[in-house]
Image: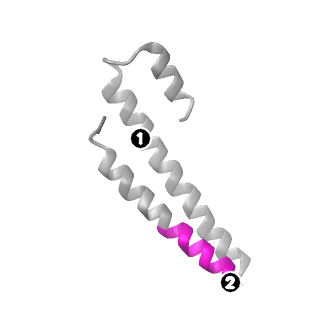
Amino acid sequence: MIHQSHADVVLRLKRARGHLDKVIAMIEDGEPCTSTAQQLHAVVQAIRSAKRVFVEDHIDYCATTSSIADLKEIAKYL
């Protein structure tokens, strides 16, 4: 099922993938740990943000068609 926010979520995940590629390159190239940790933090934040938008969108748009059990199940991922 495609929701209104899915395009935004995909963009956020692609951004996270770019950050992750950067982290991998930094580790392989022996970049400073502080800089690498900062980029790794950006990966986590980007994924966290994408997850929040995805789950909240599901709750907003599927609340009328989903069961309470389904809503409780997805809410645990917030």
Mark 2 burial class by Cα count in 10 Å: few <14, some 14-19, many 20+:
few
Three-letter code, disc 2: Glu
Q: In x, y percent, where is residue 25?
A: 60, 79
Estimate the spatial distance between the alpha carbons at disc 2 and disc 1, rounded to whole Å: 33 Å
**Relative height, residue 67 to residue 77 (above, below):** above
Q: Which mark is residue 54?
A: 1
Identify the residue at horizontal 32%, vertical 18% (top origin): 65
Q: Helix, strand, or loop for circle 2?
A: loop
Say which quadrant the N terminus sits in. top left
Q: Which mark is residue 76?
A: none
Secondary structure of the residue carrying tag 1 is: helix
Label of residue 31 in the image: 2
Give the left or right position of residue 64, taking residue 27 as reference: left
Over which residues does the magenta segment extend? 18-28
From this viewpoint, which residue is outermost toward the top?
Answer: 68
Left or right: residue 62 compared with residue 36: left
- How far across and how far down the image is residue 20, in percent? 56, 67
